[in-house]
Amino acid sequence: MTKAVSDLLAILDLEQLEVNLFRGRSPQVGWQRVFGGQVIGQALVAATRTVEGRQPHSLHAYFVLPGDPAVPIIYEVERIRDGRSFATRRVKAIQHGNAIFTLSASFHVEEEGFSHQIAPPKTPSPDELPDENEIRSRILPTMPDPVRAYFSRERPIELRPVEFERYASREKRDPSFNVWIRATGRLPDDPAIHQCVLAYASDMTLLDSTLVAHGRTVFERDILPASLDHALWFHKPFRADEWLLYAQDSPFAGGARGFARGSIFTQSGELVASVAQEGLIRVKR
């Protein structure tokens, strides 16, 4: 297991303070605000720890205020409903006496039923794309400083963008973006850990896809990006430490906001999760 993955698991391992009350911490890496995926993952951990015999199938979240990485985050879980098939939880993340984030999550017992799915897009496999070492040596020198800084540091989630050349130009493209993702080390077998790690990773590139049609990226200094809300549906079991194709598209952007959707597939083509997000993509004046 890499140190970055070990650190991520430690961040997701919340401290229980009291019944329905948990405390989470942020990595001290110099960020000005807490990464949105971290709060999603931690809130899902808090909700999951209050439910037995059911797996999460959906979550809906709102980012209310920027999180302060210098102080802990308190997660307060409200047990909305415990039915025979479904359970519902509401989680509020608190810092400095204010709610910075809210999440509603629904849990469902395993059942049989109708089944169908869309086909994944046709893309190169992750083995056909530049790996981390090749990106650092061959591709990063041609990319802007913020992109180089991001890909140069050790991260818990490995990214292999299919359309990686978009980071080296301002060419306007069709509003879609595909990236292979996986944890950079082996994870424990607990399915809840894989769901929470994917929840963390699902916020990493989705907002960036809203800028593809404009030839821009969230790494540019005059772009002010921020996640506003986030929805995630789990469809089938998966492992977050095995390659997953995150197929993203952006049907609309306007009013300084961008909307994006994502479908997450295994390498064998199974659709295991779906995502939707609206975010701020404000240009500095």
Image: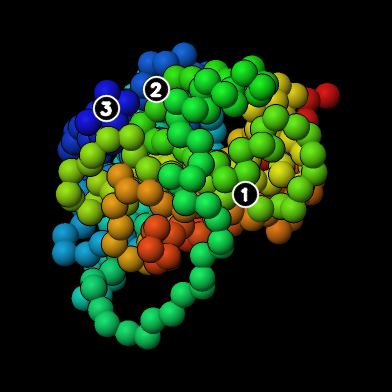
The kind of residue tagged 1 is: Phe
Alpha carbon of mark 2 to alpha carbon of mark 1: how far? Answer: 23 Å
Q: Residue at 33% of width from left, 35% of height from top? A: 184
- Classify the position of the N terminus by image quarter: top left
Residue at 37% in and 53% down: 90
177 sits left or right of 109 in the view: right
Q: Quadrant of the C terminus?
A: top right
Q: Earlier in the sequence, mark 3 or mark 2?
A: 3
Residue where numbered disc 2 is placed: 154
The type of residue carrying mark 2 is Glu
- Residue drawn at (41%, 52%) of the image: 244
Residue 252 placement, left or right of 204:
right
Q: Is residue 147 above or below residue 230?
A: above
Q: Nearer the viewer, residue 159 or 104?
A: 159
Residue annotated with mark 1? 177
Q: Residue furthest right?
A: 285
Disc 3: which residue: 2
Q: Position of residue 234 (x, y in %)?
A: 38, 62
- Side (left or right) of 233 relative to 14: right
Q: Are marks 3 and 2 in contact (CB under 8 Å)?
A: yes
Q: Secondary structure at mark 1?
A: strand
- Residue 113: x %, y % from top left: 32, 84
Residue count near mark 3 (Cα–Cα under 10 Å), binned few <14, some 14–19, many ≥20: some
Q: How many marks?
A: 3
